[in-house]
């Protein structure tokens, strides 16, 4: 369930096509994946 929520959040950020936001999200996800 957590991964699905993350996937949807990532998809939304990618659709925004804001590169700096994408980079921030990418870092947040990689750190979340390390923890999970």
Image (spheres, helix red, strand yellow):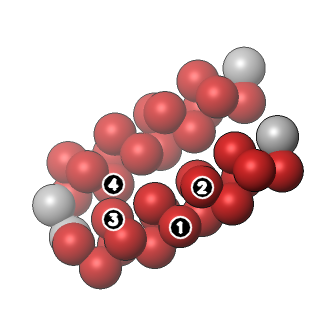
Mark sitting on residue 13: 4
Residue plotted at (20% across, 48% down): 15
Q: Earlier in the sequence, mark 3 or mark 2?
A: 3
Name the element at disc 2: helix
Mark sitting on residue 12: none
Name the element at disc 1: helix
Residue plotted at (29% across, 79% down): 20
Q: Residue furthest front?
A: 34
Residue 9 position, x and y percent, is 47, 44
Q: Earlier in the sequence, mark 1 or mark 4?
A: 4
9 to 28, vertically: above or below: above
* Number of other residues with Cα within 10 Å of mark 1, as a class: few under 14, some 14 to 19, many 20 or more: few
Residue 34 position, x and y percent, is 75, 50
Mark 1 in CB contact with mark 4 (< 8 angstroms): no
Which residue is denoted by mark 2 in the rendering?
A: 30
Which residue is denoted by mark 1 in the rendering?
A: 27
Q: For the residues marked 1 and 2, what is the alpha-carbon distance in whole angstroms?
A: 5 Å
Name the element at disc 3: helix
Towards the viewer: 34 or 7? 34
Q: Nearer the viewer, mark 1 or mark 4?
A: 1
Towards the viewer: 26 or 2? 26
Mark 1 in CB contact with mark 2 (< 8 angstroms): yes
Q: Nearer the viewer, mark 3 or mark 2?
A: 2
Pick the quarter of the image with the N terminus: top right
Q: For the residues marked 1 and 4, what is the alpha-carbon distance in whole angstroms?
A: 13 Å
Q: Earlier in the sequence, mark 4 or mark 3?
A: 4
Which residue is denoted by mark 3 in the rendering?
A: 22
């Amino acid at each position: 369930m957590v991964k699905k929520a993350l996937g949807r959040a990532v998809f939304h950020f990618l659709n925004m096509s804001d590169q700096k936001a994408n980079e921030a999200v990418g870092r947040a996800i990689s750190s979340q994946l390390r923890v999970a």
